[in-house]
Image (cartoon, rainbow, N blue to C red):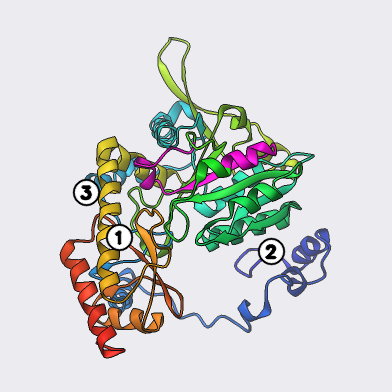
Amino acid sequence: MGSYIATSVQEREEMLASVGVGSLDELFADIPSEVRKKGKWDLPPGRSEMEVLAYMERLASQNQVFRSVFRGAGAYDHYIPQIVKSVVSKEEFLTTYTPYQAEVSQGVLQSIFEYQTMICRLTGMDASNASVYDGASAAAEAAAMCRDRKRNQVLVSATAHPDTIRTIRTYCFGNGMEFLLVPEKDGMTDIEFAAAYSNAQTACLYVQQPNYYGLIEDAGTLGAAVHQAGGKYIMGINPIAAAILKTPRECGADIAVGDGQPLGMPLGYGGPYLGFMACTADLTRKLPGRIAGETVDAKGRRGYVLTLQAREQHIRREKASSNICSNQALCAMTMAVYMAAMGAEGMAQAASLCASKAAYLRNGLKEAGFLPVYGSRPFFHEFVTTSPIPAGEVEKQLEKVGILGGLPLAEDRILWCCTEKNSREDMDELTGLLKKMTERGGGL
């Protein structure tokens, strides 16, 4: 309803009246005033292409590009084979949009179908959709899938990513579902609490594997606890870790979700990313968004179509469990190309390197006085240590030498991460710098 839309004052008043509000301020009343723009926009005059490019280059030069990254917490700096960008940058892939007309969208539909197939193989599930917006929305959509007339309670592990927890909580508020946070116990999901509070009203339990602290959860036992009460089990997974850990299906999960960023997508200031979703056969018709299927035409030739599209999110939105109608097609293509290029062995090797390098780094940090918080508990490629120096100061000092350190969780806690890109030299340099800071009680 901004002024750039060609609507008259009368038309705006009619639209406001139709939704039951008297003014634009009343329409946006739910948006906190401190984040709303006050006054008029002070926009500069238009510029030429050359001027805009020069301006953007000057802005970009202010960014700090870290030569070494030891931070994860949901977005990971993995190596991306050059063929991935080469393929997905092709014009026929880069410019495609929604494949509404199947007869002229066979290439895009096939790419979605191949992506879905790979996600099913990675998770052990029977069906996958064409993706949703990100990992947090995938988790929240999965919780909405599990709701029925008698089951309205959603259990979420406190060891999941904070952003995912907040997103599920928001969805539950909007859907009128009860949200219950399962507390952590020594960095892990409290299994006794989850079992005790799983009951006839429990729709599902969401657990992240590995969890936010990098630890490997007892996923099978947690799944059994919620199944005992008749609820569904949702596992949020790291797709790289999934190459060497038990699949969600093997852990008893009904739905597997996660963020596809580790599979071929650069960090890119938080996006665009992709949320993947897969489930067992009996939940297929509850998957949100679109699903591409393989079929044959009248002459017996293989073809691809969109299936299960005539659903509530299109035709009865007020009764829909989900209103997601789109997907991250280019990101899904990126994931598919990455997985095809790496293969099962390549992905398993990348995962093994992540785990072994993280173990090496943790030992080095221990010698520098940064002690593991969760002792001998198994972990993948992230772990939490104490910090003998204020965590914010550690972050600031490392940035000065081009290193993005771990994520400060508290004044004396840091969440570190290793991927296959971190060399022994990088890790030895980091631990040497931290040892020097510890000895000096501060800066480098």
Q: Whole-Å distance between the Cαs marked 1 and 3? A: 21 Å
The label on residue 418 is: 1
Q: Amino acid at mark 1?
A: Cys
| Tag 1 and tag 2, C-beta contact below 8 Å | no
| Tag 3 and tag 2, C-beta contact below 8 Å | no
Magenta-drawn stretch contains 81: no
Residue drawn at (32%, 40%), measured in percent from left and top? 339
Image x and y of residue 287, in percent: 59, 37
Highlighted range, magenta: 223-248
State left or right for residue 288 relative to residue 113: right
Residue drawn at (65%, 47%), measured in percent from left and top? 195
| Rendered view: 41 above or below 415 | below
Q: Earlier in the sequence, mark 1 or mark 2?
A: 2
Helix, strand or loop for disc 1: loop
Q: Whole-Å distance between the Cαs marked 3 and 2? A: 48 Å
Q: Earlier in the sequence, mark 1 or mark 3?
A: 3
Q: Whole-Å distance between the Cαs marked 1 and 2? A: 53 Å
- Counting labels gives 3
The residue that label 3 is drawn on is 82
**Of 120 and 208, which appears nearest the observer?**
208
Which of discs 1 and 2 lies nearer the camera? The answer is 1
The quadrant where residue 72 appears? bottom left
Q: Amino acid at mark 3?
A: Gln
Residue drawn at (31%, 59%), measured in percent from left and top? 77
The residue that label 2 is drawn on is 7
Q: Residues within 10 Å of mark 1 (few under 14, many from 20)?
A: many
Is residue 385 visible in the rendered image? The answer is: yes
Image x and y of residue 207, in percent: 55, 50
Image x and y of residue 399, in percent: 29, 79
